[in-house]
Image (cartoon, rainbow, N blue to C red):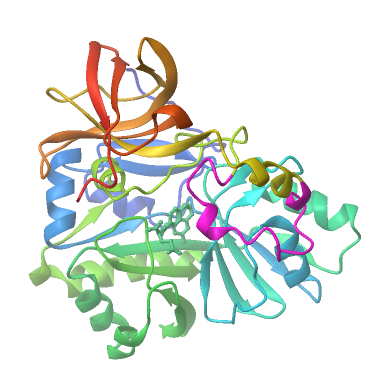
Amino acid sequence: MSVISTSRRLRRTPFSEGVEAAGVSAYTVYNRMLLPTVFESVEADYHHLKRAVQVWDVSCERQVELRGPDAGRLMQMLTPRDLRRMLPGQCYYVPIVDETGGMLNDPVAVKLSEDRWWISIADSDLLLWVKGIANGYRLDVLVDEPDVSPLAVQGPKAEDLVARVFGDRVRDIRFFKFDMFQYEGYDMAVARSGYSKQGGFEIYVEGSEIGMPLWNELFATGADLDVRAGCPNGIERIEGGLMSYGNDMTDDNTPHECGLGRFCDTQTAIGCIGRDALLRVSKEGPVQQVRPIAIDGDAVARCDRPWPIYGGGKKVGQITSAAWSPDFSINVSIGMVRMTHWDVGTALEVETPDGMRCATVRDAFWL
Ligand code: THG
């Protein structure tokens, strides 16, 4: 593949200078912003992430801010997850659905206070949908994209590194909760969350100008922890079953098809715009669903288009993400599979770019 030309439309981030100095070797585009995908190599980055600690420029996880008396009401209109028991200081993984129950995004909702929320979005133009709803329903709420850029610190040594910079109080933050900290006079929400299964934190950096000072401090303070620049890792996230919007799911899928039924309370999520549609489809249940799938043979190619899945000679689904896993010595993948072939242990065939491969539906890759 050739290179992508940059311009003002492809936004840099407050940390781009540091990412470049650290020797980034590939980017993708996410919410019209640069997102690093490789530093040393995807495999070297993977081993390092599981062993030490990495700092990730995930500024592309843009925030849609809701501010005003109707912020909570608007938030509940967007998702079938029941938000009534959510408290300030909590983060919720929330499916966002349209009027047909189709997935528009799968962000993390951050409740700052009753009338101030951030929606930390995956790769789709959610701001436009949210502005449209707020204005169409004449809600008393401001909707915009603030100058907030998440910086993730991930890996087994993440807690030690973040504690050195923000103090031991970060150790008390529980999974999917956040607390407020000061850095050089700037208020920052620090959450225990992130797009890996290795544990870690996300720092919501408000004010681009404080980005590089914080970046540099993390590296200076963590030298003995072997801290390196990293990024969401294509192998590790498939192993861990973390879904990628636009890859593993689109607006053609319901949350239930995406395996996100556990984040839906469609009966009680009063006000959710897709509620009626979801109540209708959830009566019968989904006819296809996302599954972890092991693909036999040596390392597969990069999955940049869906690979057809066959069962008994008929097409029964598609693989949407795949990678060779060094730790499990199999190709790990995520696919959407028809009900007739989604049981654990079902034998399948996958049409990869270099030929047919045998494959098996798995429970999870670590089982
Ligand atoms: N962090 C923040 N914003 C984000 C992401 C993130 N925006 C884009 C993208 N990632 C959104 N998608 C996800 C997908 C999975 C998770 C978070 C965001 C995730 N899931 C855990 C899981 O499925 O095991 C835990 C979910 C839970 O139990 O609540 O972490 O990573 N700020």
Image label count: 0
Which x, y percent locates residue 41?
17, 38
Q: Is residue 338 visible?
A: no
Q: From the image, which quarter does the N terminus lie in?
A: top left
The span picked out in magenta is 255-276
Residue occupying the point 38% across, 39% down: 291
**In front here: 10 or 319?**
319
Residue 183 occupies quadrant: bottom left
Which x, y percent locates residue 214?
34, 71
Which x, y percent locates residue 159?
24, 76
In the rendered structure, the answer to whether residue 194 lies left or right of residue 90 reads: left
- Figure check: 125 above or below 293: below
Residue occupying the point 35% across, 14% down: 312
**In front here: 127 or 6?**
127
Residue occupying the point 43% across, 85% down: 182
- Figure check: 9 above or below 59: above
Question: Residue 266: within the magenta?
Answer: yes
- Figure check: 303 above or below 180: above
Q: Is residue 158 visible?
A: yes
Question: Residue 207: within the magenta?
Answer: no
Which x, y percent locates residue 69?
81, 76
Quadrant position of ligand 1: bottom left
